[in-house]
Image (spheres, rainbow, N blue to C red):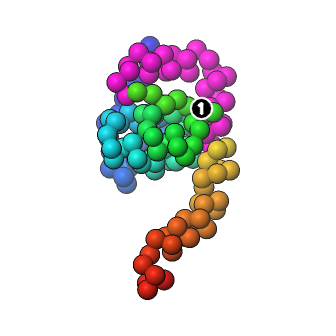
Amino acid sequence: MKNIEIRKPTSFEEFTKSFADADICFDLRAFNFENHHSLPIKLFYYMGAGKPIIYSSLKGIRKHMDVSGFGYLVNPKDSKKIADYIETYLKEAQLYHLHANNARKEFMQNYNWEVIKNSFVNFIKNSLPKNSK
């Protein structure tokens, strides 16, 4: 394969610019307690940009969303499976475009600020001690 570029991590300020021209977005973080119980915000940036994802199969993601319409969850140590998914996208342009469109659609329907703001504000309000509300 040619024209493959793997980029190094970047600062938050440069993050969205760093993946603007990417075709597939990855986050292959290690399995540990903290990672398993999180729902990484990076995932939502990728979805909002309409990027298919290949992501570590974290419990937090599996519990809260189904990514099968726009990407794959993997064991980050299974390089063969990761390479197979990349190759699938390269060979099946229609699947790639379906996943890209589905990522953006899922974000707009379920995860953009206009959709989640009330539940987010209520979560914060309900998390505060009773005397600070």
Q: Identify which residue is drawn at 56% across, 70% down.
A: 122
Name the foreground residue: 21 vs 38. Answer: 38
Q: Is residue 12 left or right of residue 98?
A: left
Badge 1: how crowded within 10 Å, few (<14), some, or many (20+)?
A: few
Q: Main secondary structure of the magenta part?
A: helix
Q: Position of residue 120 (x, y in %)?
A: 55, 65
Kind of residue at badge 1: Ser
Name the foreground residue: 45 vs 109. Answer: 109
Stretch in magenta: 76-104
Question: Is residue 91 highlighted in magenta?
Answer: yes
Quarter placement of the N terminus = top left
Q: Is 16 located above or below residue 62 in the figure?
A: below
Q: Identify which residue is drawn at 64% across, 62% down.
A: 114
Q: SS at mark 1?
A: loop
Q: Residue furthest front?
A: 130
Q: Position of residue 97 (x, y in %)?
A: 64, 29
Q: Position of residue 107 (x, y in %)?
A: 61, 48
Q: Identify which residue is drawn at 59% across, 32% down.
A: 68
Q: Position of residue 99 (x, y in %)?
A: 62, 31
Q: Is 93 located above or below residue 66 in the figure?
A: above
Q: Is 51 located above or below residue 97 in the figure?
A: below
Q: Label 1 belongs to which residue?
A: 68
Whether residue 97 is visible to the viewer of this picture, yes or no, is: yes
Q: Is residue 121 left or right of residue 102?
A: left
Q: Is 85 located above or below residue 23 in the figure?
A: above
Name the foreground residue: 58 vs 21. Answer: 58
Q: Is residue 56 left or right of residue 97?
A: left
Q: Identify which residue is drawn at 43% across, 38% down.
A: 58
Whether residue 46 is visible to the viewer of this picture, yes or no, is: no
Question: Is residue 74 highlighted in magenta?
Answer: no
